[in-house]
Amino acid sequence: MKSLNQLAFRLFRENKFLVFTSIASIAIAVSLVLTMSLFAVNAKQTLKDDLREMYGDLDIAFVYSNQNPVENEMALYQSISKHVSTVSVSEVLATQAYVTPLGGEVYALGIENDPIAKSRYKTTADLTEDTVILTENLANSLNLSIGEQIEIEQDSFEIAEILTNAQGTGIAPDMVIFSLERANLLKDTEQSFLQNETTALMVKAKDQTDLIAMANEIKKTQPNVRVDIIEQDEAAKNNIDSLTLFIVVLSGLTLIITSVMVISNFDLFIYKNKNQFAIMRALGAKTTQLSKIIRIQSSMITAAGALLGLAISYLTDQFLQPRLGHLFSVSLTEMPFVWEVAIPVLIVSSLVIQLFLYIPVLKSSNILPLNILQENEELDFRDSGMRKIIIKVLWISSIVSLLFGLILAADDNARALLILISGFLLLSSFFAALPIWVSTILNTIEHKFRKFLSSNTLLALQVLKPQVKKNSFVILSISVVMVITIFGSVMLNTIKHNTTDYINEQFPTSVIITSRIHQNEIDPAELSEEVRIQVPNARVASVSTFGGGELFADGRTVSFDYTLGDLKALESLKILPNLTMDDLATAAIVSPAFSKQNNLDVGDSLDIGFYSEEKQQAEYVTTMVVSDISEAVTEGEVLFDWQAYALNDSVTNFDKLYVDLLDESEAAASLEILTSIYPELTVHTRAESLDEFSSMFLQRWAIFILVLIVLVVSVIAGVFNTLLNNIMAKRKEFAVLRSLGVKPSGIMKIVVTQISFYLLTGIFLGMLYGLIFTLIILLIDPGRFAIDFALIVYVAAVMWIMGLLIFVPVGWKLGNKKISMEMVNDNK
């Protein structure tokens, strides 16, 4: 007599392939869950690190200006510096400074030589009263380098450092950085730039500080101070919100796919165990003895699979992802493997999988052998009527949840949660309906395309019809792969396209030439002609800086901002719509918002004036006519032509020149010559900005892209493991077909047909599920979304080609096995 341990291990030895595929399915499932868990932990930390990289040691800033002053600056500084949560305080002065080589003012800062200021503005040099730091654009335009002198505010300074321009942000401003002491000395010069001066007290707080509570305490004593909390940064919050949504949805889909893989791959394991236990029960084995065998087998399989999954997850996290990052030329934030997260997740996953293995077979050990065998041979789901009821309930619940989220939600969090629940309920209903749809698809193919199909193909499909229960899990796992691919690609593509759209909005033409200084003496007509000389085929249109006007309406005056421009040229560049007036000297193009506020229509007259400081009231200057109401007016409320001479005063100087080029690469060098003629000009190209953004996007989202790749590849591996298990479970079926006259090549064709049906049906339904599910989830933040159809087709094609490469040899091998040996293999 053999011991129970020996018996359990003998059953292992007799079913090597079954044990191998079961361990493999557990390893893939555990590695997927671990990957997503570690991704959830590391991803948010990555965004927080990015935020820290952007703002340095700054946690909270208290801001005031001469236009929004505080009652007592010294009292504010003392209350902040002595606050119990404050580690250190750094003062920064923001203003404008006159740069003599440019002949105008640029943005200027005065900072202290402390860690907060250096980390916030990415400086390394210690500034003195005689040194400054310049941005790269400004230094290049003036042909200056570190160590050279520059005249600013009628004084000479040595350039201590040159800061690299921020990439991927479109048109970056120029900046000069002084020491705070020197910036404060400039206060006594009574220069015009001091009329617009802002001071910020940057604070590094202790860890775990409630920054909102700290802000409220300070505002009680200084109510006029503005508070900027870095954690509340709008862009950072949007990124973290997008990431949280990304993680929640991917985690849900990961749980679905791992559950499906475990159920599908253990299907054969449970089937064989039930058969063996039925025989043992018939021979007199006790329930306790069978339970021990089950515990030994399931524990060994689960432990081996879980440890292998942990090893895969560790190798992926520590070795594969960095190498993929090197392959794609992106640097990833190196993070240690988070064992304190991985171990609990591993234990919980193992226990859940153990239940999947243990409970179904244990239940069978308590019933009669004949009942076990009858139950084991069921090929379809029970009670399809109940299934249809469940599907309808899920659909109704999804619609109700979606309506509540869109219409009745109390806040954004409740709205997001309800829409998320709606998406998963709808997805669950699709999955529940899958067996019904699979049967419908099989019947449709058989009846509608019978005359186009070979006998082997028809036979392969007919064999699948009674096995809807088993086939549904296989197709479901393939569908989830496509859902993950579509959702992940749409999320990342949408983020990328939205930023690309923003850059394209900044660049309505391929090149924009801007002035660093507002008070310049550049003649727009002369500059336009100079560009045409440098680039003969270029089309150009100029726009002015802002002017301030007063509109006389209904016995009152309304202040508004306006710009001047070459309206005909702007029309030819498609920046403005077709103009309706020929007399451009009196034409006014107004924004829809300004039109609505003042009840203006096309053809209305506008009596316009300027505010007189001397008379303390508006004085009439000229009358213009509303020629168009256009969304194209985005800078200011009204756009006039340069021919409106009465409105072209000392404030409305040249600001930018739109340049449309046929060959941007060849013309860029010619346009750079302009900076030697006009040093205050900067040339910006759309292509360069888009290239910089693409690099920044890949760098910022690299970890998420790589995790998505690892996730999809792992799931595909699990799917093929499931398919292989499914095909190997049909060995007796294929042997029966061989005995009925089907040739080995016919068996191969049947295998390939069934695999193709699984893959194509799963891919098609997965694409449908994925698109609908993603559209619902995107209702959380409505807007334009982008679908990468090429990636979807690529993943689908790779899965199908991999299926053929794997299963053509498998089908050929099965077709050439000995019929007598295959007939004794357990089948389902």
Image: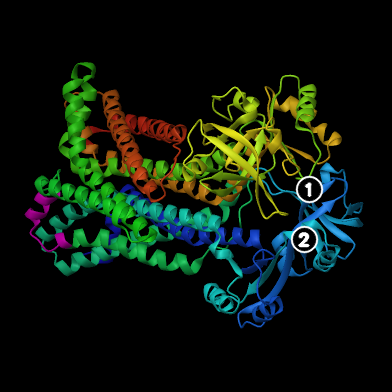
Coloration mode: rainbow
The residue tagged 2 is 194
Quarter-of-image position of residue 819: top left
Q: Is residue 403 above or below residue 744?
A: below
The three-letter amino acid code for the residue at tag 1 is Glu
- The percent coordinates of residue 107 (x first, y second) are 75, 53
Q: Position of residue 279 (x, y in %)?
A: 13, 55
Of badges 2 and 1, nearer the viewer stands: 2
Q: Label 1 near label 2: C-beta < 8 Å? A: no
Amino acid type indicated by mark 2: Leu
As rendered, which of 318 and 73 lies closer to the eye? 73
Does residue 365 show up magenta in the picture? Answer: yes
- Work out which residue is located at the far top of the displayed protein and give it: 451
Q: Is residue 796 among what the camera can see?
A: yes
The magenta span reads: 363-377
Q: Position of residue 542 (x, y in %)?
A: 70, 32
The residue to which callout 1 is attached is 136
Pick the quarter of the image with the N terminus: bottom left
